[in-house]
């Protein structure tokens, strides 16, 4: 073989190798080429803050819902992808909800004469209730592909919560004093200093159910920051499904605390009021702000 033909042979072999390598790389290319820089992860975890607006929906006809409260919480979230655009969402949420309500009640004991613990009063109680829950949510999550840097999602599911603590801020207005056995012949309370007494951060775990179930509906976005890290923004409606008032201590007899909402004024006395079981459902809108990894 001529020495002059050797460089030409080497060049031909090098060209052939480059062509084969190019074909191999093309055959092994990711199916996500041209759509996303990173393959969609099958499992994602994150942490989020949960500021909330909560309220109580009274359903017994005698309890009045008076407004909403703002509270704060936090949580851990996990998404398990089982298809390109679908996931099972779960995690743990620790949050507070509650609301404001007003009831007419019977109390025993003179607040200004502690030694006299037999006198009964008809009072109007204005309560701000705060419930502390740890919740396990399970939901179906529907996701779009990344549009720009944003992925849009929606979710629908259920949550099961455990009551950790319940506290109340109460304003009690003493309205009438009555005989311990019957309520006829009650008299307007005029000798109390102001007619009102306030109580702060009172433990009321016995008046709240131990467990709660909720329907979860939410919308949000994930904004890609870098690689597989994303900023999570969302809003979730957490709708209680069952009564969260514990009626163990209350019932339809004159010996019970809650009274039906008969007219109560400075001159009109509620005659023969009946007791009732309080029924209320708690709801909240939870705002999510966190990071996914």
Image (cartoon, grey):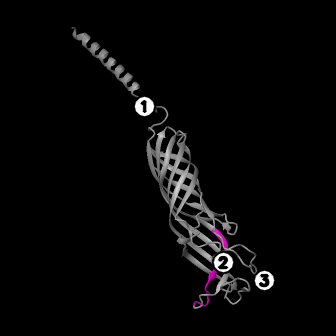
Query: Quick one: label 3 or label 2, which is nearer the N terminus?
Result: 2
Main SS, magenta region, reads: strand
Decide which of 241, 91 is in the foreground and name it.
241
Q: Nearer the viewer, mark 3 or mark 2?
A: 2
Please say if the residues under marks 2 and 1 sit with CB atoms less than 8 Å apart.
no
Which residues are the magenta region?
100-114
Report which residue position mark 3 lands on.
267
Give the numbered dot on residue 254. Answer: 2
Q: Nearer the viewer, mark 2 or mark 1?
A: 2
The answer to whether 199 appears left or right of 187 in the picture is left
In percent of the image, x 36 and y 20: which residue is there? Answer: 19
**Quarter-wise, where is residue 130 in the image?**
bottom right
Q: Is residue 3 above or below residue 200?
A: above
**Quarter-wise, where is residue 22 in the image?**
top left
Q: What's the distance in space between the residues labelled 3 and 1, CA to CA?
A: 83 Å
* Residue 173, horizontal then vertical, whole percent: 67, 80
* Residue 149, horizontal then vertical, whole percent: 52, 42
Give the numbered dot on residue 196. Answer: none
Report which residue position mark 1 lands on.
30
Badge 3: residue crowd in 10 Å (few <14, some 14–19, many ≥20):
few
The answer to whether 152 appears left or right of 24 in the picture is right
Q: What's the distance in space between the residues labelled 2 and 1, CA to CA?
A: 75 Å
Q: Secondary structure at mark 1?
A: loop
Q: Is residue 111 magenta?
A: yes
* Residue 147, horizontal then vertical, whole percent: 55, 39
Q: Is residue 76 above or below residue 86?
A: below
């Amino acid at each position: 073989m001529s020495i002059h033909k050797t460089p030409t042979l080497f060049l031909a072999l090098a060209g052939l190798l480059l062509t084969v390598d190019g074909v191999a790389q093309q055959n092994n290319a990711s199916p996500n080429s041209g759509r996303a820089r990173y393959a969609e992860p099958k499992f994602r975890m994150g942490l989020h803050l949960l500021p909330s607006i909560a309220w109580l929906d009274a359903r017994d006809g005698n309890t009045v819902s008076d407004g909403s409260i703002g509270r704060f919480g936090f949580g851990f979230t996990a998404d398990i992808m089982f298809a390109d655009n679908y996931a099972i969402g779960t995690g743990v949420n620790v949050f507070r909800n509650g609301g404001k309500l007003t009831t007419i009640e019977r109390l025993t004991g003179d607040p200004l004469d502690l030694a006299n613990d037999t006198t009964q009063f008809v009072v109007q109680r204005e309560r701000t209730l705060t419930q502390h829950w740890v919740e396990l949510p399970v939901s179906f999550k529907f996701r779009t592909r990344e549009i720009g840097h944003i992925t849009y999602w929606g979710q629908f599911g259920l949550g099961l919560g455990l009551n950790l603590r319940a506290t109340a801020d109460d304003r009690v207005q003493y309205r009438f004093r009555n005989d311990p056995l019957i309520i006829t012949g009650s008299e307007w309370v005029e000798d109390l200093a102001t007619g009102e007494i306030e109580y702060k951060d009172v433990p009321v775990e016995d008046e709240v159910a131990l467990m709660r179930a909720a329907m979860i509906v939410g919308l949000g976005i994930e904004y890609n920051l870098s690689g597989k890290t994303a900023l999570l923004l969302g809003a979730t409606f957490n709708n209680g499904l069952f009564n969260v008032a514990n009626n163990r201590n209350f019932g339809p007899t004159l010996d019970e605390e809650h009274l039906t909402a008969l007219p109560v004024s400075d001159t009109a006395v509620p005659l023969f009021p009946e007791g009732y079981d309080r029924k209320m459902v708690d709801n909240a809108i939870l705002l999510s702000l966190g990071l996914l990894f």
